[in-house]
Amino acid sequence: MTQDELKQAVARAAIEYIVDGEIIGVGTGSTANFFIDELGKVKHRIRGAVASSEATAVRLRAHGIAVLDLNEVQEMPVYIDGADEITASGAMIKGGGAALTREKIVASVARQFVCIADGSKLVGMLGKFPLPVEVIPMAHAVVSRKLAALGGTPVLRIKDGKPVVTDNGGAIIDVHGLQISDPVALEAEINNIVGVITNGLFARHGASVCLLGRPDGVEKLTFS
Ligand code: 5RP
């Protein structure tokens, strides 16, 4: 099976988690895109969706799914999204698609976070995937120095020759070379650096469930 087929399989399996008549939180990225395509087939079952990025909102609308403003929504049963890395206890690195801040905000309103990923995303220790940190653009140099002091190698994310600008107007620093043995503590420490908007560790509130695509089927991990 290709990686895309594994992503499609978990996207299909995640449909089981939507709750009829409710609002659903939707993530960003290639796996989330497969999920949106599956959601489009059962859109009559939900009231609408809250998007974690402009790109996700565009894709949801293209399927005729109503996109709601998070400020109008008090709670949701479920948020469904991919991850760049996930551990066996449900801590994740996210933000490869630069949507980490809105992802964390939307996920915070949902009772359950269902992570959908191909099996390659399951790791023993977080950090091989560079940790994305969204920052206020004027602060990227000072924040980078502080991230370097934590032992990582910070690199400002560049696309088409220019610093990436997120949906929130932020910049992204990718921190290479971290071995994250205590993701809950590091998430709090990085969020405390002045100039940081959010970091891509989802550890304090990690996944509730992870559907992992394997060549022989979808493996389900449940976290307490
Ligand atoms: C975007 C994310 C994505 O969930 C993460 O990068 C995984 O993406 P993909 O499903 O394309 O592998 O956090 O900000």
Image (cartoon, grey):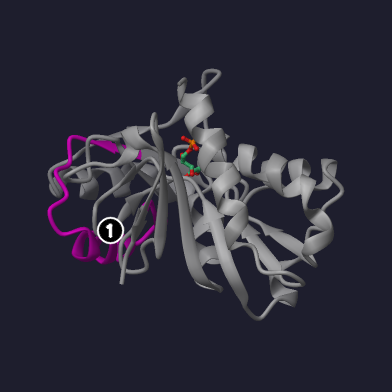
Viewer-proximal residue, 112 or 166? Answer: 112
Q: Quadrant of the N terminus?
A: top left
Viewer-proximal residue, 145 or 172? Answer: 172
Q: Is residue 148 above or below residue 2?
A: below
The percent position of residue 72, horizontal first and vertical second, equals 75, 76
Q: Which residues are magenta?
A: 174-200
Q: Residue tagged by mark 1? A: 190
User: Image point 63% across, 38% down: which residue?
Assistant: 33
The percent position of residue 87, horizontal first and vertical second, equals 25, 50
User: Image point 31% across, 58% down: which residue?
Assistant: 90
The percent position of residue 11, horizontal first and vertical second, equals 57, 43
Q: Is residue 220 above or below residue 123?
A: below
Q: Quadrant of the C terminus?
A: bottom left
Tell me, yes or no, whether the highlighted magenta stretch contains residue 193.
Answer: yes
The percent position of residue 152, horizontal first and vertical second, equals 18, 40
Q: Secondary structure at mark 1?
A: helix
State the residue lying farthest toward the front: 216
Check disc 1 and give the amino acid type.
Ile
Question: Does the image show residue 60?
Answer: yes
Q: Is residue 61 left or right of residue 186?
A: right
Q: Is residue 53 left or right of residue 89?
A: right
Q: For the image shown, how many numbered marks are present on the structure?
A: 1
Name the image quarter holding residue 172: top left
Q: Is mark 1 within 8 Å of ligand 1?
A: no
